[in-house]
Image (tube, coloured by chain):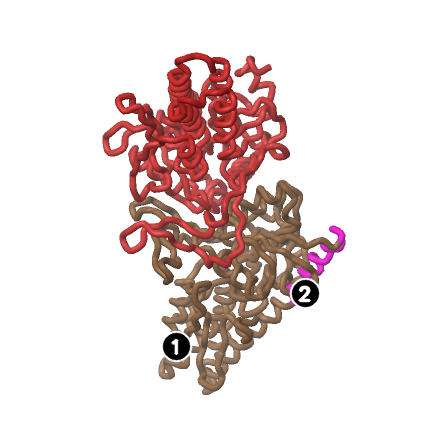
Chain colours: A red, B brown
Amino acid sequence: MKVNNKAFQSIWYETDTDKIWVIDQRKLPFSFETIELNTLEQCFWAIKEMVVRGAPLIGVTAAYGLYIAIKTNPNKTSKEFIVDSADYLKSSRPTAVNLEYVVDAISQKLVENIETSKLCDLALEFAIEREKQEIKNCSNIGHFGLSLIEDIYFKNGKQTVNILTHCNAGWLACVDWGTALSPIYKAQQKGIPVHVWVDETRPRNQGARLTAWELQSADIPYTVIADNTGGHLMQHSLVDMVIVGSDRTTLNGDVANKIGTYLKALAAFDNNIPFYVALPSSTIDFNMTDGIKNIPIEERHGDEVLQMECFVDGIVKNAHLMPESTTVANYGFDVTPARLVTALITERGICKANEKDILILFPEYQ
Amino acid sequence: MKVNNKAFQSIWYETDTDKIWVIDQRKLPFSFETIELNTLEQCFWAIKEMVVRGAPLIGVTAAYGLYIAIKTNPNKTSKEFIVDSADYLKSSRPTAVNLEYVVDAISQKLVENIETSKLCDLALEFAIEREKQEIKNCSNIGHFGLSLIEDIYFKNGKQTVNILTHCNAGWLACVDWGTALSPIYKAQQKGIPVHVWVDETRPRNQGARLTAWELQSADIPYTVIADNTGGHLMQHSLVDMVIVGSDRTTLNGDVANKIGTYLKALAAFDNNIPFYVALPSSTIDFNMTDGIKNIPIEERHGDEVLQMECFVDGIVKNAHLMPESTTVANYGFDVTPARLVTALITERGICKANEKDILILFPEYQ
C-alpha cells in the first residue's frame, strides 16, 4: 500500500543491501519511521514489543529472524542452534498460532538441510516465500470478502456499506492488503462506497492509531469510536456487517482475536448483523478444538493500560492516563465462540465456522 | 464518604456562608479540588461540562441551581423566570430523566408559591430535601444490594465476591453512598470480602479515574481493566456478578446507562452471570416503555475521544491520544434491553425489570 505516494509493505527485504526493514508501528500515527532488523535478538524484541504486530506479520518477521540468525552466526549452523533460535522466536508471543507454524516449518526444513553450504540462502528463500505467500493469501481474502460487501451493497439499494472492525487487521498487520481490511480495499478499488466504524481498541489503540491511519491514507471514510460504542450503533442499524481478523482460529471455528472482539460478536448476534472473521489458513490451529479452554491468552504489562504515547505540547510524550498506583490488568485477546461467527473468509473461500466446513476448504488437514 | 479522613459529599450546602460546594470531578484523580457554584449559569455549566455527573447528583445540582437562580435574582421572582430557569437547567443534559423530574417537581411547587415572601427559603428547603432523599435512597439501595452479594458469598463457600462495574455509580455520582457501589460499601462494612473489576469507561474514563479513586480511598480491592476485557473475564469465571447504575430506566425495564453497558450485559447473559442495575426510583421514566426507541442518547464533542487530561512530566496536561485530523464519534449512553437485566435494585427493594414488578414496588405510578 502507498504511504505518501510511495509503495510500502510492513516488512521487506532490501536486496541491494541484504537488509530487513520494518515500519515501527509503535510510532504511528504520530510519526512514520522504518527500522532495520539486524540480529535475532532484534527480531524477538520487535515482535515482543509490538514494533511489528498482527499474526501474519509476526510470522514473516520470525521467518526473517531465522535467516538473520544463520547469517549473523556463520559458525553456529548446528541443528541445536536452529532449534534454539526457533524456540526463542516462538516464545516472543503466545496467542498467534502461525508464529509457531511458520517457525516450525522453516526450522524443520533448515535442519534437514543443515549440511548444505547454501543454508543461509535457503533460509532467505523460505522467508521470502513466506512473505509472498502472505501477500497472496491476503489478496485472495480480499477477493472473497469483497463478494460479501457487494451482496450488502446491492441488497441495501446501493447505499454506503457500514462495516465495523476491531483492532488493526490491515496491511500493517499482514505485510500487504490485510485480512479484515483487504475486502474493504478491494471494495474501494471497485467503486463500492464503504464507511468503516473503527473501534479505538484499548489499551494499545491499534484501531485509533493504525486502522484509522491506514484508512485515512487510502482515502476511505471511517469514524473512530470508543470500544464501548459498537452495540449502540448496531441497535440503531448503523452497522451492516462486522469484519475482524484473527490471531488463532481453532478447528471448530472459535476465534481468538484482540480483546473485546467477543463483545462485538455478541452485539452483532443480538442484532442479527453478520459477523465475519478474515484469516489466512496459517492462523487456523488444526490441532485444537476448543478455543475458550485451550488457546493461551497473553497477559501483558499493566503499563499499557496506565500509560500511552500521546501528542503533548506539540511533541510525542509518555502520558499517564491514570495514577501509577492504580491496580490494573491487561489481557491481550479473547475468544469468540464459533456459534457467534457468521462465516470465515479465507484465502480459499468463505466457509462456516465449524470443523466440517473448514476441512472441506482445507482437506489436507483431514 | 471520607477523603483523607474528612467526610465529604459530592455536593453540599454550607450553612454558615450560604454557599453550594461541589467536588470538581474533572480534576480527579490527579487532584482533589472543590468549587463554589454561585450562579444559575455556573450550575448549568457544571452539569454540562461534567464538573458534576451521575444522574442523582445532577438532579441535586439542578435543585440547588433553582435556589441560586432565585437567590441571585431577588427582583425576578415571576412565574416565567422560574419556568425559564427550569427549562435552562433541564437542557444541560438529555439522557438522565431525574434531572427533568426534580426540576419539574421543584419548579412547579415554587410557581405555586410564587407570591410567598419566603420563596427563596422554600427553594433552599426543596433542594436540601432532594439531597437528603438521594442519600437515603442510595443507602437503602446498598442495604438491598448487600443481600445479593451475601447470597453469592455464602453460595461460593465464603470466597471473595468478584463484582464487575461500568463507569462510576459511586458516591461521587450520588451525593453519598452511590447506587452500584453502595452495596459494595455495605459489604465492606459487614466484613464480606469483595473485589471489583472496574471498566476504564472510555472516552471519559470515569471508571479508571473516579471509581478506582473511590475504591482505593475506601481500601476496597479493585482492578481497572480496558472496556474490552469483561467478556473474557466472564468466560473464565472471574466475575460473580455485575452491578451498574442507570441514567434512565423505562417502565418496561430497559436501562440507559454509560455507553458500553449493553455489551457487558450481553456478556453476562451469555455466561449466566447475574446483571443487576442499582437505581433510585427518581431515574425511572414511568412514561416510557421502549428504551431503545425512545430514550434520547446524548452525543458529545469528539474532543472527549481525541484528548484527555493526563499526568505528563509531573503535571496535568492535555494529551492528544490520536491526531486532531482523526474522524471520531462520541455517543454517551446505550440502552440495555430489559431481557438482559437480572433485576433492579431500588430504594424500596429488588424487582424484576418489567412493568408489573416495577409497579408492585411503586404502586403510586399505576
Three-letter amino acid code of the residue under disc 2: His
Tell me, yes or no, whether the highlighted magenta stretch contains residue B144: yes
The structure residue drawn at horizontal position 34% and vertical position 52%, both measured from the top left corner, is A317
Q: A111 or B79, which is in the foreground?
A: A111
Among the 4 quarters of the image, the one containing residue B151: bottom right
Q: A83 or A349, which is in the foreground?
A: A83
Q: Residues within 10 Å of mark 2 (few under 14, many from 20)?
A: many
Dot 1 falls on which chain? B
Q: Residues within 10 Å of mark 1 (few under 14, many from 20)?
A: some
Quadrant location of the C terminus of chain B in the rendered image: bottom right
Q: A111 or B282, which is in the foreground?
A: A111
Three-letter amino acid code of the residue under disc 1: Asn
Which mark identifies residue A256?
none
Give how far across and how far down residue A335 sits, in percent: 56, 35
Dot 1 falls on a residue whose secondary structure is loop
* Residue receiving disc 2: B143
Give how far across and how far down residue B71 sits, in percent: 41, 81
Query: Magenta residues, as a range?
Result: B140-157
The structure residue drawn at horizontal position 69% and vertical position 57%, both measured from the top left corner, is B149
The structure residue drawn at horizontal position 66% and vertical position 64%, both measured from the top left corner, is B188
* Residue A351 visible, this angle: yes
Tell me, yes or no, whether the highlighted magenta stretch contains residue A51: no
Give how far across and how far down residue B140 sits, in percent: 65, 67
* Residue receiving disc 1: B38
* Position above or below: A360 against B170: above
Q: Main secondary structure of the magenta part?
A: helix
